[in-house]
Image (cartoon, grey):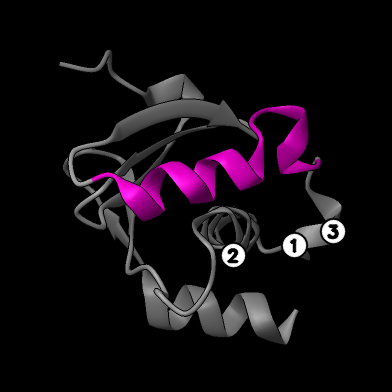
Amino acid sequence: MAQTKRWKNSRVTYDDATGAYRIDRDTREPLSTNVVLSIAAIEDVQPTQLPPLANTIDPDALDSVFGCSNDAILSFSYAGYRVTLDALGSLEVVPVGTAQPLQ
């Protein structure tokens, strides 16, 4: 739990206006790891308590796409959240029940 608490305190901010969590990505970690750690921190659970990310999206493909593209944008649902990522480093997590359609 200490890892997720540190992650939440140092990397996760909540925007009341949009209902979205914004994540300050750790570029030393794969993007897939950032996604799992962020949602675990928001939920206040261990990462192993979440469903495997691979049940939703191929973690290796996710890491590869954002490692070689300058204009990629991807949104997918995972563990009750809509996760939106872009090649510029933005990582946003919104509870599915409050997520707005992508513009």
Return the disc, 3 or 2, that comes first in the chain's sequence: 2
In space, the residues marked 1 and 2 are separated at their CA atoms by 6 Å
Between residues 65 and 95, which one lies in front from this camera angle? 65
Q: Position of residue 56 (x, y in %)?
A: 68, 28
Label 1 sits on residue: 45
In space, the residues marked 1 and 3 are separated at their CA atoms by 8 Å
Q: Amino acid at mark 3?
A: Thr
Q: Is residue 40 left or right of residue 73?
A: right
Q: Is residue 64 left or right of residue 2?
A: left
Q: Which element carries disc 3, helix, strand or loop? A: helix
Please tell me in which quadrant of the rendered image residue 57 appears. top right
Which is in the foreground here, disc 1 or disc 3?
A: 3
Q: Position of residue 93 (x, y in %)?
A: 41, 43
Are the two marked residues, 1 and 3, in contact with CB atoms closer than 8 angstroms?
Answer: no
Q: Which residue appears at 42% of the width and 75% of the height?
A: 26
Furthest toward the front, the residue is: 68
Q: Which residue appears at 49% of the width and 48% of the height?
A: 64
Q: Amino acid at mark 2?
A: Ala
Label 3 sits on residue: 48
Quadrant of the snapshot with the C terminus: top left
In space, the residues marked 3 and 2 are separated at their CA atoms by 12 Å
Q: Position of residue 92 (x, y in %)?
A: 34, 46
- The residue segment tinted magenta is 52-69
Q: Amino acid at mark 1?
A: Val
Label 2 sits on residue: 41
State whether residue 97 is above or below residue 40: above
